[in-house]
């Protein structure tokens, strides 16, 4: 069964959860249609929550037991959360539509480089470890370390630090990430190409910014696995097994247009200046 995963997801305070999950479902479904995929498909939203943000825990408190998901069809007008057998996994369902929501963290290294810890809610203090040590710590706590591309974040010394990490032989799986905020006119980043040459897969995501308009972005940019299947009870265990055995990941989705990119960056920088 094919799996589509958005591997860089933020649920910002400005977002309506109902609109967020509906948009994710619609975007995933559109990607399936455009990729000529037939049959059943699993959709996964991998959260990457920053410091001070823990929407996953709030949703988990509202979640219903897994047997209700397995035994009782949903006929509600809104999205509902269901527990899995894993503490960091939820199922989101509305009528016949369902998706997996997986906990994860967005971390910052000593060098001020972003690192994602997918599939784990374990806390690691920001700016306390070098990028290499942070990746090792993430893996030790059960997370999947991903170094995501970001506007201006891989230039200069920071870019050299990322390059050193990619060229260092590790006993852990490391991924790099592209994201939907990279504009269509932006050349494919050299470090992403280097990663592919080294056999390091690209695991992408939409990376919604703290802008109301970005509540429609989840599921619009990500990765596809064609021949795998998730366990309803233990989706994270399934994902870890998938990532441990594959280096072949297909991406889907398009970056933003030049006008939207400029507007988004202006709005984000304005928010920073205003202290939001």
Image: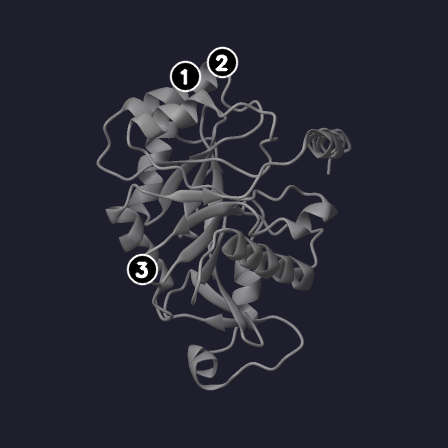
Q: Which residue is mark 3?
A: 238
Quarter occupied by the C terminus: top right
Q: Which residue is mark 2?
A: 156
Residue extending furthest toward the bottom: 71
Q: Secondary structure at mark 2?
A: helix
Label 3 Cα crowd, 10 Å radius (few <14 / some 14-19 / many 20+): some
Q: Secondary structure at mark 3?
A: helix
x then y, percent, for residue 168: 27, 24
CA distance separating discs 3 and 1: 34 Å
Vertically, is 32 above or below 79? Answer: above
x then y, percent, for residue 100: 47, 62
Q: Earlier in the sequence, mark 3 or mark 2?
A: 2
Label 2 Cα crowd, 10 Å radius (few <14 / some 14-19 / many 20+): few
Q: Which residue is mark 1?
A: 160
Label 1 Cα crowd, 10 Å radius (few <14 / some 14-19 / many 20+): few
x then y, percent, for residue 141: 33, 48
Count numbered badges in the picture. 3
CA distance separating discs 1 and 2: 7 Å
Q: Is residue 250 visible?
A: yes
Query: At x 49% / y 86%, what residue is drawn?
Result: 72
Vertically, is 152 above or below 82? Answer: above
x then y, percent, for residue 70: 43, 81
């Amino acid at each position: 069964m094919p799996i589509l995963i958005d591997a860089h997801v933020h649920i910002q305070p400005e977002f309506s959860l109902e609109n967020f999950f509906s948009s994710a479902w619609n975007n995933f479904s559109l990607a399936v249609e455009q990729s000529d995929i037939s049959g059943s498909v699993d959709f996964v939203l991998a959260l990457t929550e920053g410091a001070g943000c823990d929407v996953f825990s709030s949703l988990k408190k509202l979640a219903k037991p897994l047997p209700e998901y397995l035994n009782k069809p949903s006929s509600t007008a809104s999205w509902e959360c269901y527990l899995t057998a894993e503490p960091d996994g939820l199922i989101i369902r509305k009528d016949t539509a369902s998706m997996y929501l997986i906990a994860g963290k967005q971390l910052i290294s000593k060098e001020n480089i972003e690192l994602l810890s997918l599939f784990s809610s374990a806390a690691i203090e920001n700016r306390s470890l070098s990028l290499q040590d942070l990746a090792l710590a993430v893996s030790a706590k059960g997370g999947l370390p991903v170094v995501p591309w970001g506007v201006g974040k891989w230039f200069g010394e920071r870019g050299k630090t990322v390059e050193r990490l990619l060229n260092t032989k590790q006993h852990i799986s490391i991924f790099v990430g592209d994201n939907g905020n990279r504009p269509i006119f932006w050349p494919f980043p050299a470090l992403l190409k280097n990663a592919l040459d080294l056999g390091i897969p690209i695991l992408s995501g939409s990376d919604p910014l703290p802008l109301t308009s970005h509540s429609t972005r989840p599921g619009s940019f990500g990765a596809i696995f064609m021949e795998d299947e998730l366990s309803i009870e233990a989706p994270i265990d399934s994902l870890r097994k998938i990532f441990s055995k594959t280096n072949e990941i297909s991406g889907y989705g398009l970056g933003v247009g030049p006008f939207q990119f400029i507007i988004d960056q202006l709005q984000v920088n304005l928010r920073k200046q205003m202290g939001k």
